[in-house]
Amino acid sequence: MDILLIVIGVICTIVGILGCFLPIIPGPPISFLALVLLDLTEKNPFDSNTLWTWGIVTAAVTALDYIVPIYGTKKFGGTKRGVWGSTIGLVIGLFFFPPFGIIIGPFVGAFLGEMSNGDTDNKTALRSAFGSFIGFVVGTLLKLVASGWMAWLFFTNIF
């Protein structure tokens, strides 16, 4: 049974890393599942504090992945319309244009939201959209760091 759990854990680790780049796959939660599966083996390498800590990190990184593009839009001078456009673009892009929609959606949404203001010029709207893109990149890096660290924990504790 341990071998089956480890094999499934290895698959989850690989899929978790891929999920950092493919928006349809939730990378950190799948990487965390690999740690849980490894902990179910006879070796039981993690204490409860480790699993709770990584569970909280996973939840935080997953939530931040949706919040950071919106924050980036706001930080780069976006108005409420730009933030709403970024949010709506994220949702539309996620469901209708995967996997690229999660990159393009917030960018286009923030741009269109800013342009709908009427008094916003193209330069300001593009700056806001760029903030959304920077937020996406930061979110992806956060997921990659968390999933990479969980992969390291998994593989160093197999033996």
Image (cartoon, helix red, strand yellow):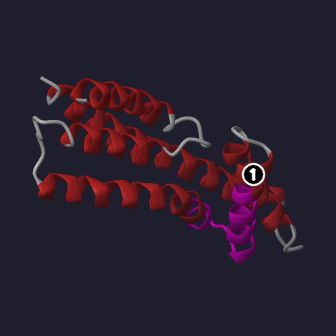
Front-lying residue, 102 or 107: 102
| Label 1 neighbour load within 10 Å: few <14, some 14-19, many 20+ | few
Position above or below: 142 against 7:
below
Image-based side of 112 in relation to 34, left or right: right
- Whole-percent x, y for residue 137 in the image: 53, 43
Q: What span is colored magenta in the figure?
A: 72-91
Secondary structure under the numbered disc 1 in the rendered image: helix
**Which residue does the image show at 73% across and 41% down from the upper left?**
98
Residue 17 inside the magenta-drawn segment: no
Image-based side of 5 in relation to 99, left or right: left
Q: Quadrant of the N terminus?
A: top left
Position above or below: 59 against 139:
below
Kindly identify the amino acid type of the residue bearing the numbered disc 1.
Phe
Q: Quadrant of residue 9?
A: top left
Position above or below: 114 against 33:
below
Q: Quadrant of the C terminus?
A: top left
Image-based side of 111 in relation to 33, left or right: right
Q: How many marks?
A: 1
Q: Quadrant of residue 34?
A: top left
Image-based side of 157 in relation to 37, left or right: left
- Whole-percent x, y for residue 141 in the image: 43, 41
Q: Main secondary structure of the magenta part?
A: helix
**Which residue does the image show at 62% across and 62% down from the upper left?**
73
**Which residue does the image show at 48% across and 49% down from the upper left?**
139
Residue 77 inside the magenta-drawn segment: yes
**Which residue does the image show at 37% across and 30% down from the upper left?**
8
- Whole-percent x, y for residue 16 in the image: 43, 36
Identify the residue under disc 1: 95
- Whole-percent x, y for residue 118 in the image: 89, 73
Position above or below: 156 against 111:
above
